[in-house]
Image (tube, coloured by chain):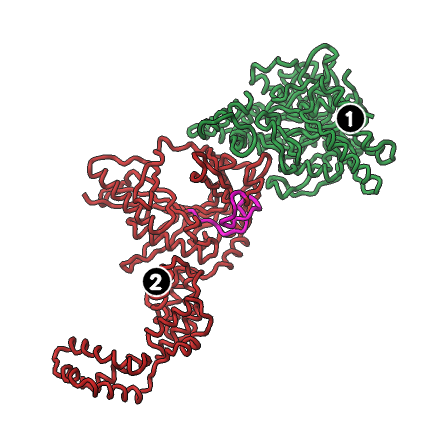
Amino acid sequence: MHNKSVAELSRDLDSGQVSSVELTQEFLDRIKREDSKYNSFITVTEEQALADARVADEQRAAGNATPWTGVPFAHKDIFCTNGVRTTCGSKMLENFVPPYDATVTANFREAGAVCLGKTNMDEFAMGSSNENSYFGAVTNPWGLSQGNKRVPGGSSGGSAAAVAARLIPAATATDTGGSIRQPAALCGVTGLKPTYGRVSRYGMIAFASSLDQGGTMARTAEDNALMLNVMAGFDPKDSTSIDREVPDYTATLNEPLKGLRIGLPREYFSDQLSPAMEQQVRNAVKEYEKLGATVKEVSLPNAKLAIAAYYVIAPAEASANLSRFDGVRYGYRCEDPKDLMDLYTRSRAEGFGEEVKRRILVGTYALSAGYFDAYYLKAQKVRRLIQQDFINAFKEVDVLMSPTTPSPAFIQGEKTSDPVTMYLEDVFTIAINLAGVPAMSVPAGFVDGLPVGLQIIGDYFSEARLLNAAHQFQQVTDWHQREPQ
Amino acid sequence: MQWDIVIGLEIHVQLATKTKIFSGSSTAYGAEPNTQANAVDLAMPGTLPVPNEQAFRYAVMFGLAVNAEIERRSMFERKNYFYPDLPKGYQTTQLERPIVGPGFVDIDLPNGETKRVRIHHAHLEEDAGKSLHEDFHGMTGVDLNRAGTPLIEVVTEPDMNNAEEAVAFAKKLHSIVTSLGICDGDMSQGSMRFDVNISLKPRGSDTLGTRTETKNLNSFRFMEQAIAHEVERQMDILEDGGTIVQETRLYNGDRDESRSMRTKEEANDYRYFPCPDLLPVEIDDSFIEEARNSLPELPDARKARFMEQYGLNDYDAGLLSGDSKLATFFEEAASQGKDAKLVANWIQGEFSARLNAEEKSVADSPISGAQLGDLVVRIADNTISSAGAKKVFEALWSGENDSVDAIIDAKGLKQVSDTGALEAMVDEVLAGMPDQVAQYQNEEDPKKRKKMLGGFMGPLMKASKGQGNPKLFNEILVRKLGG
């Protein structure tokens, strides 16, 4: 049962082959039994999940079910869950229980899905390896059989590892610079970062507001489509969400790909990419050609500036977004503050981890008088150039394809001492966030027994086309069905 | 040395929207602490701001009222600093593209001249909460009810040259925002707060001196005192050969003292940057036209109309048109009869004195405009004397529910104006006072004669049981005594 997709489980629930309570119990048991190896969950909400499953079974019986009614899933611990602690991977919020739901959380609740818990993540979504969690690093299910503890990627490493290990069929995730796609690639699952503004950010704890986007993670493209059907839509509580009709993303999954114009960005097939990785990606592109797609090389001339621009803009926004964690109203407060300044400095020094503090400092610096123009304004100009690169590219092609990451999952601890090397993990994903376009990572082979992700990038609001392209690929390949040993 | 005083103002105006600028919490004043602060106001993780359209409408109305350009694409910035009553650790405000661009306001000076004060810009922003330092035993209490209340901050050019001009401008601005109905104008509740920038320069010099900013003055009187205080402080320093430090100062109105809050070197680097949670706000022609059409009569237009329609002089019209509630009160009163000047006198005299004595505003007056109008009608038609009118006024003020006429009847205040009856009384009284009559008639000095006339009034009023029309008594006396 744990190998089934959301779509399959939904059908089984519908036919009465299994009850939600049974399914929920099975996945809870798996988490209990297996997750000590991965540490992919921060919080498991067993009682609540079983109660929700009972309600879901009643709804099914009463005949008012959605495809999600009774299907188990998990939330990245960045989405606020009413009455269930939401840590964002931080000591700062170790005991924070929000009295409200994120819009994404509320949408899944309304759809009748059964949330089993909250998945591990890099603290405040800052990281590419999930080693920055206050609740401990997450281990990639791939590579354990070789005797190595590898990173699952980050920041949504808990969601990716849990889905790869079949602890849960699907999990929400967020992506600010690659935090869905990179872990999806490293864990061999399918993930989608939607267009900026497609999914409400209300109740999703902010890292960099102009880049953050909630998205989906599951093993199949079809399940990603089912998730997006629940998540996408305008939200009056989020002024940056976009009021635009939400299609049924499952309706177009089976459209033929004949005539699909694929662009391969020259800059993403560079020296940074190992020949073995490149080979896997090119093989995947060949599959698309067999399906009737045409391929041409395109250019994203400003792509090389993306990391530099990102590491000004994202920390700048983060430095302000994280100011609210001041020990005054909620969250961690230091012991016996002697005055206000002491309360602030020690609460923040003790409550935040190293990477978070690093980015707050970088962002504060970039916004400071005398540096603002050289850093922040310059980075915003670069951002517009990068946006224009994508707009230009999509005049020529329908989708862009590239590797998701320059290399497969690395061993824990390998890159923790050098933040810049770690930042380069996102070299192929970051520009997409700066442009705001949607992109997926789809399992596309293995290198040294470790999964490789194919990144498919689309024009604004082309999620249906991306899911269609991924789904068709998954009809002719089985990379996404491979199970870590 | 002779000095020129240069004053610019920054005025925080709380907008009278029902809910906050970025959340649905109520803005009502005076609730229990922290009962009007929701998850957004508390800056709970993941919460986001949603702009309140009404705040934008009010800001546009203000812009139109001060002859300003409206920014079609205005933006919000974050102003970063840590303070316990600032929940997000930044204030959402406007820097690069404020909603109201340059404009101007004309003020009337005591010498009868008009002066134009330029508005540099006005921007929308959110208010902070309140830190309460008393009653917490060395700790600080935080009340976030006010956090997120919409403000417009109006910034003037340094166009004022003394405290009187600054106060005249402040009063005019108060009059404009209350007339527009975009602010309740209640200064005691902090609905308008003034920051005053002051510098001195040698008379006639083109170079501005170093300025100081005195913050958070919440009454016209404190503002006037604070300016006088700061001008004197700076003058003392400069005349002793010292230099002014650019700094922010706090003024204590109760003690007429000020102290430095922070110098320029200690000033925060606010690290302003565009707020990524809010898209630029597009304001189109129809929104502006709608706001323009909803503009009520503004103080300048009202003053001109009062002069034209009621025949008031410039001074009276200025006073009565400034405060929209007072203006309405006046018009209710004046519409009862024809003697608008007498209504104006009563409002500025007895009525204002009572309001001030009891620290009431026009809105709290126990007397309606119509009642005062009825009263003035009876004064004008000689039904009651001014002494009697004061008694009626007292009765109304203390809440007597009857009509003015019923009160006059009940208290027996109607004057006797029957000339025949009055003449008979005069004859009788004069007959009983032959010595005084002779004395009067032998007196040459008209001033003394006039004074002696008063000696007959007492007995006359007594004879008429207080109801004789004093004016008619006077006329008859003068005639009978022979000039």
Chain of the residue that carries numbered disc 1 in the rendered image: A
In this image, B307 relative to A115: left or right?
A: left
The residue nearer to you, when weighing A415 against B332, is B332
Task: Answer yes or no: is residue A100 visible.
Answer: yes
Magenta stretch: dominant secondary structure = loop
Choose top left, top right, bottom left or bottom right for residue A475: top right
Q: Residue A432 appears at what percent x and percent y?
A: 62, 29
Q: Residue at x 36, y 71 (%)?
A: B391
Letter of the green chain: A
In this image, B135 relative to A68: left or right?
A: left
Q: Residue B225 appears at what percent x and percent y?
A: 30, 48
The residues tagged by marks 2 and 1 sit, at their Cα atoms, a distance apart of: 80 Å
> Where is B107 relative to B330, above or below?
above
Q: Three-letter amino acid code at disc 1? A: Phe
Say the numbered circle drawn on residue A27.
1
Query: Is residue B17 covered in magenta?
Result: yes
The residue nearer to you, when weighing B69 against A38, is A38
Start-end of magenta stretch: B12-34
Task: Answer yes or no: is residue A255 visible.
Answer: no
Choose top left, top right, bottom left or bottom right for residue B230: top left
Q: Three-letter amino acid code at disc 2? A: Ala
Q: Residue A56 appears at what percent x and percent y?
A: 79, 37
Chain of the residue that carries numbered disc 2 in the rendered image: B
Residue assigned mark 2: B353
Say the numbered circle drawn on residue A127.
none
Letter of the red chain: B
Q: Residue A450 appears at what percent x and percent y?
A: 72, 15
Query: For the residues tagged 2 and 1, is the chain the same?
Result: no
Packing grade of label 2 (10 A; few <14, some 14-19, many >=20) is few
